Amino acid sequence: MIRGLLEDLWLLFGRMFPLPTTPGLREVGRPDRSSPVLVTCNFSLTVRKVIRTLERDGIDAWLVVAPTRGINVWCAAGGGHFTTDTVVSILETSAVAERVDHRRLILPQLAATGINIWSLKERTGWKPRFGPLRIDDLASYLERDKPLTTPAERRVHFPLQDRLVMGTNLAFASLVFFVLPIAVASIWLSGFWWRSILLIFLLAVLGSLLVFRLPGKPGLQKGLSLGAIVVTVFVVVAQVWWEMSSSSTIAWGGWILFLTAYLGYDLPSWSPLWRADVKELLFGKRHTQIEITQDRCTGCHLCDVVCPVDVFERNGETGKYFVAHLDACQACGACVENCPADAIVTNFSSGVCSCPTCTVIKGVGALEARPPAAAAPITDAAPPTCGCGSCSGDPS
């Protein structure tokens, strides 16, 4: 219990750093050979929440925890850590097929970015389906004769509680960027470090809580809107009550405006609603393009099932789908990954996010993926590695 509380406290600030739990098969309740089989990531918070919800709702289930490097479902799927290969591998190693008489598999909807449901079915013989976006909706989903999610169960939201948590994580991640310049500036400016830390957390949380009410588009525009409001209040307080000098007021006002601009630019990377490239984050100019080739569309409905923001609608006359809400598209690529007819044309492959946090994560990933230095020639041929992770050293 104490460990769980410590993990929850850490996840309130440090979600930028993965927190894995052991992959494998979990028994929730008293599952039998007809119980549902669920798949999720090995992000500790997600696994504990899924188990807690299943137990609360009285659902006996087999839970297959896939190795996603401790990253949550959506980020792991988009980053190439929760893929078709990942699920194929964990189904084999967990031996869950020996525990059930059926081959029905329920996947988290947000994993559709990295998992091709058609390929998974062909390679494993299982019958995979994407379940509801929120685990809270699983009980009602399982009670239906035909397991198909409703539009409400597929739609992603960004409620107040989540915005508060993401605000603290945004602040913590931002300190990684600013810790060095703040430390250097504190050599000459007494108290600058602790004031800046408090300011970053205050502005990050405030921006996250007010993001829907601030004028402008997500990114720099909303950041500057928040900055203008906060600086105005600060100047009045500093001059009327604190009697701060004009030079100090201007300097702190400029620092506040800079921080709000940066935090506003980076906030979309901590939100489930906005995935943007540099042009959109800086100028509010839409860059994402997506359309469905009508001649190829089969009307299978899967693009609508995996889309978390209702980009698509069905044409009542033709039965085919079309892009109805382009501005909502997050460029997650779930529809492209799962379209059986290759009917969806986009200008992205696996997302177009260029926010600071994602840039750092991609940079670290690129460093980890650098090819090793050329080895010296050998005379005896070495046996090939099996790729299991123990042989090759690559757990992916």
Image (cartoon, helix red, strand yellow):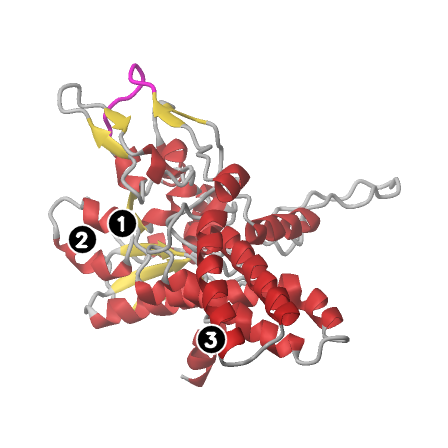
The residue positioned farthest toward the left in the image shown: 145
Residue 252 vs 305, above or below: the answer is below
Residue 296 vs 88, above or below: the answer is above
The residue positioned farthest toward the top in the image shown: 295
Whether label 3 touches label 2, CB < 8 Å: no
Q: Is residue 389 left or right of residue 204?
A: right
Amino acid type, label 3:
Glu
Of callouts 1 and 2, the N-terminal one: 1
Q: Residue at x 58, y 73 (%)?
A: 197
Q: Residue at x 82, y 44 (%)?
A: 373
Quadrant for residue 293, please give it: top left
Mark on residue 141?
Answer: 2
Quadrant for residue 99, please give it: bottom left
Q: Which residue is mark 1?
A: 131
Q: Where is residue 101? Give x, y as percent.
A: 25, 52
Q: Where is residue 216? Give x, y as percent.
A: 40, 47
Does the segment drawn in magenta span residue 298? yes
Amino acid type, label 2:
Tyr
Residue 323 vs 207, above or below: the answer is above
